[in-house]
Amino acid sequence: MAAWSDASRGDLRPTGHGPADGVPLVLLAGELAEATHSRVDKVAWVTQVHGSQVHAVQSEEKAFGLGPELLHLGEADALVSASSGVALCVLTADCAPLALASAEGVFGAVHAGWRGLHAGVVEAAVDRMRGWGATEIVGSLGPCIHVECYEFSQQDLDTVGEVYGDGVRGRTRASRPALDVSAGIAAALERSGARMAPGVDACTACGDGYFSHRARRDLGRQALLVWSTSQTTKQ
């Protein structure tokens, strides 16, 4: 299962690495688990650095304390797991929040800014899932900045276009060069042998109710949470 929050939940960034520093995020995870009749014991998150590192979350990794709590796993821009009871989290305010799933129960969460996209974070996450036995992998994209709002330098646009093709090139409403992040994500999934499925098609910059660093210099972050509804734990 996957869910994307909006700004109505407030800023969901944990303020630190301790058990009391991400209460809004943990509360949201608990509500989602209850609504889907699933179990979440841990919410795993990472310090995002716009790279391609993927952290694999094992079921035996310990959270703080005894209840559903935060599990900080260092620096990365994607997480994968096959464990029930674990919710994977990435935080965004224009970058692409990509949920990954497979029939085998391996799932993932990816934070893809343009640098991470160019570095291959999507392909790296899919590859790690395949290493855990996933075959047919599906990706769903949540709210991110859309092409009409994402003016981009020609040099950087050429850099991304060299990897993912001319489909990532677009124009803003003012006819300035722009990056189509959604097209880049779709191209990265295709390159990795995965496919795109419907997600939440909303622009964080011009849509209602989302944090946007590019449009408004917002400090707050919305969250993507991905978790398993299975009651069995896989390794």
Image: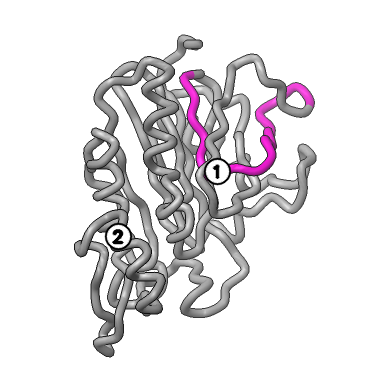
Q: In the picture shown, does residue 158 fall above or below 69?
A: below
Q: In the picture shown, does residue 13 fall above or below 197?
A: below
What is the distance, in whole Å, between disc 2 and disc 1 at their CAs? Answer: 39 Å
Amino acid type, callout 1: Leu
Q: Which residue does the image show at 64% across and 54% down from the upper left?
A: 13
Residue sitting nearer the eye, 74 or 145: 74
Residue sitting nearer the eye, 153 or 97: 153
Image quadrant of residue 208?
Answer: bottom left
Label 2 sits on a secondary structure element that is: helix
Q: Position of residue 172 (x, y in %)?
A: 28, 81
Colour mapping used in the image: one colour
Q: Position of residue 125 (x, y in %)?
A: 43, 35
Magenta residues span: 65-82
- Residue 198 numbered mark, or none: none
Report the number of numbered marks.
Answer: 2
Q: Which residue is mark 1?
A: 28
Image quadrant of residue 193?
Answer: top left
Q: In the picture shown, does residue 73 fall above or below 129?
A: below
Amino acid type, callout 2: Glu
Instruction: Judge from the rendering whether residue 193 lies leftward or rightward of residue 112; answer left or right.
Output: left
